[in-house]
Image (cartoon, helix red, strand yellow):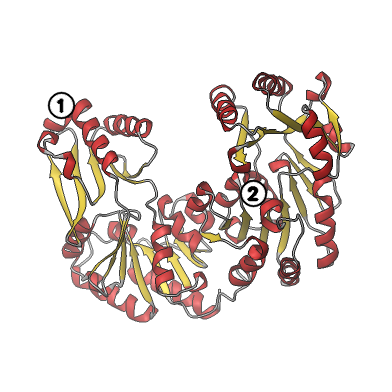
Amino acid sequence: MINNLFAIDLDGTLLNAYKKISKPNLDALKHYSDNGGKIIIATGRSISSARVYVDMIQKYIGKKLEYIITLCGAIILDKNGKEIKKCLISNEISKKIYAKTRELKVACWAYNDQSIKKDSVLCNNKFFLFISKLNFPLKTIKFIPSSLNGIAKFNIFSFSKKKILKLVSWLSKELSDEINFSIGGAGRQIEIYNSKCSKGTSIQHVCSLLKIPLNQSAAIGDSGNDISAIKDVKFGFSIGGLNQLTKIAPFNLRKQNKAVKHAIENYLLVDSRSEAKMFAFNIDYIFNNLKHSKKCNFNKQLLNFVNRCNCIMCLCTDYSFTELVKISHDLGFSLNNFHYVVLENGTSVFDFFKNRLIAVDFLNKDDLSLVFNSINNHFKFALLNKKISVVVNGVKNEKIYSFNIEKFNDMHFDHLTNFLSISIYSSNKVLIDSIIKMLILSSASIGFFWVNNHHVIITNKNASKMNMLKLIISSLNISHNNLFGFGHYDNDLSILKLCSSSFAFSNASANVKKFATHIAPCSKKFELGDICNFFLKKQKNGN
């Protein structure tokens, strides 16, 4: 078994459209529990509203759930129903939020200490007082001034999306340091809770109590309040097509009725000792440690690595194709030893079987013009005086090319197409920071990542190593259980989260070591064979 804790959302995830738990999902939960897995519920509901489902699960699996996360992480209960953590909104902030809902004339219901103890919910709208009686197993009571004390969570609803957007804008501007909020209900509902709590932070707390590392945890959900949960665990599953969730979740499931069953049977309880089919790793760390190695030595190590691992090799790099070719030439090895290469943090994939690009994520034309115009208008002096250097990587006739930009005036924006990325170099980090801040404010579709303090690469926001690896294993019909990985830097986290088994060296970044399933000792004299030996040893031992 590769996973010890599974945090499950209720509405839209474990529950079907009729607010029931299907028998296939219950059977899967029992199977998971019988194999030693810890099940916790992570819901936006109060315990009063969730209790009927908790009781049903506990009866079916024959044991109590260790912990229950309620109200989007505001309150955590242990298996005996005792509160072990509580995080409330301050009275002053609660009054401001309630006053704003009155001003916008939107429906609002909330949970405070007293209402939770009395199995009730506070409500400010007659219509929702009536509707809630049909949907919640709770008493509904009207807001009074004293009821704004000790609020755990606000729910706000309006049929008008404009009102919701106004409220979101106000919350972001006035209360961003005090509260967290998530949007759901097709953009018509907001959940508001203390900034120090979320499903994600609560899962981390539970993991620490159970002494389960995050790299052995999983979470599944379908809405905005599940983003933190899916982001903070090793195995994140999203349901449906919510864009924010699908971008960060390694695994996207479509069938709500059996999604929990599918996650358990196809990912969490699959034996990880099966033979590896694909190995994905970051080559940049290896390059940085082998700059002074002998060419023949490295080439020999690489060939030995590929032959001994006996699986499809996928190279992941932050370098462009042109840079990678130059480095491989300098180190004296052939890129044809690999099968695939994911370039520039996920902008494209080159297939060495077919000797061509098989996937690309281009910058769009408007963003290209925006980048070029911004640099030309505001940083032209720096460009002409070579205080910054700009390199463009693109695709022409299925080949990747690179060229330096010296004057943007010579560029014809009408013909800008097939651009993968724009690299900006400068010894002045403040100068690069200024460019990036300007671009972020100007476009929501631009992404970027830092290679180092003096080099930043601008890409399409959707470009990622994880998305490209998903495409490769899907085309080869390789399951995630047969995907293994090695990472070292923070932008390798998406590789590690996708792989069933992964490792990093002991000198990797803290985040990488948190999500790697194995940590390998790092010797002063680095050898590529170290990776291969560690990988094969773990495979032989079935870890």
Q: Which residue is mark 2?
A: 204
Which quarter of the picture shows residue 174? top right
Q: How crowded is the residue under tag 2: few (<14 C-alpha within 10 Å), some, or many (20+)?
A: some
> Left or right: where does residue 503 sit relative to residue 9?
left
Residue 532 placement (x, y as % from top left): 39, 73
Between marks 2 and 1 in the image, the one whose residue lies nearer the viewer: 1
Q: Residue furthest right?
A: 118
Quadrant in the picture for residue 96: top right
Residue 36 at x, y = what percent? Answer: 72, 69
Tell me the residue at 34%/53% (across/down): 345
Q: Quadrant of residue 390?
A: top left
User: Residue 136, how many percent across, how many down?
Assistant: 82, 44
Left or right of 59 on screen, residue 541: left
The relative height of residue 363 versus residue 283 in the rendered view (above or below) is above
- Residue drawn at x 24%, y 55% is 320
Q: CA distance from mark 2 to mark 1?
A: 48 Å
Q: Secondary structure at mark 2?
A: helix
Can you see residue 4? no
Number of marks in the rendered image: 2
For the C terminus, the quadrant is bottom right
Q: Is residue 221 visible?
A: yes
Badge 1 crowding class, 10 Å Cα cut-off, few under 14, some 14 to 19, many 20 or more, is: few
Amino acid at dot 1: Phe
Q: Which residue is disc 1 drawn over? A: 381
Q: Quadrant of the N terminus?
A: bottom right
The foreground one among 325 and 260 is 260
Q: Position of residue 319 (x, y in %)?
A: 27, 54
Residue 318, disc: none
Q: Amino acid at mark 2?
A: Gln
What kind of element bears circle 1?
Answer: helix
